Image (cartoon, helix red, strand yellow):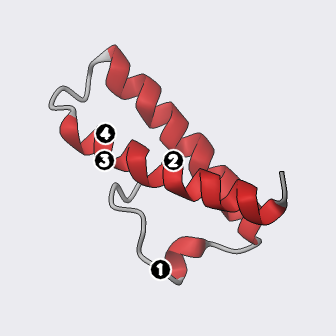
Amino acid sequence: MTKKELFQNSLDEFMRVQKYLQLIPDQDSDIYTEIKNRYRELKVILDSISGFDISMIVDIDKIKE
């Protein structure tokens, strides 16, 4: 997988994960915690692949953690 493909796949998953987090009403639930962990992992991946904080260019982070 190329860096570009990894970036695109991670970005797609990041957008889905955010949507899921917004749909879960109970932020204390186990499922919310697990998805939130994946959200954090994806943020790190995206930042490291791009080499800069991508949220500064495009406001894709709706959770704002």
Instruction: Determine the image quadrant of residue 20.
Output: top left
Q: Amino acid at mark 2?
A: Glu
Please report contact status of discs 1 and 2: CB closer than 8 Å, yes or no: no
Q: Position of residue 38 (x, y in %)?
A: 53, 35
Q: Which residue is disc 2 drawn over?
A: 13
Of all residues, the one furthest to the bottom in this rendering is: 57
Marks 1/2: CA–CA distance: 16 Å
> Above or below — where is 3 with respect to 41?
below
Q: Residues within 10 Å of mark 4 (few under 14, many from 20)?
A: some
Q: Amino acid at mark 1?
A: Val
Q: Which residue is disc 1 drawn over?
A: 58
| Residue visible at 47% across and 79% down in the picture | 58
User: Which mark, by number, is residue 20?
Assistant: 4
User: Which mark, by number, is residue 39?
Assistant: none
Q: Which residue is disc 3 drawn over?
A: 19
Q: Position of residue 32 (x, y in %)?
A: 33, 27
Q: Which callout, 1 or 2, points at the residue further toward the start of the chain?
A: 2
Q: Position of residue 50 (x, y in %)?
A: 73, 70
| Residue visible at 66% across and 52% down in the picture | 44
Q: Which callout, 1 or 4, points at the residue further toward the start of the chain?
A: 4
Q: Amino acid at mark 3?
A: Lys
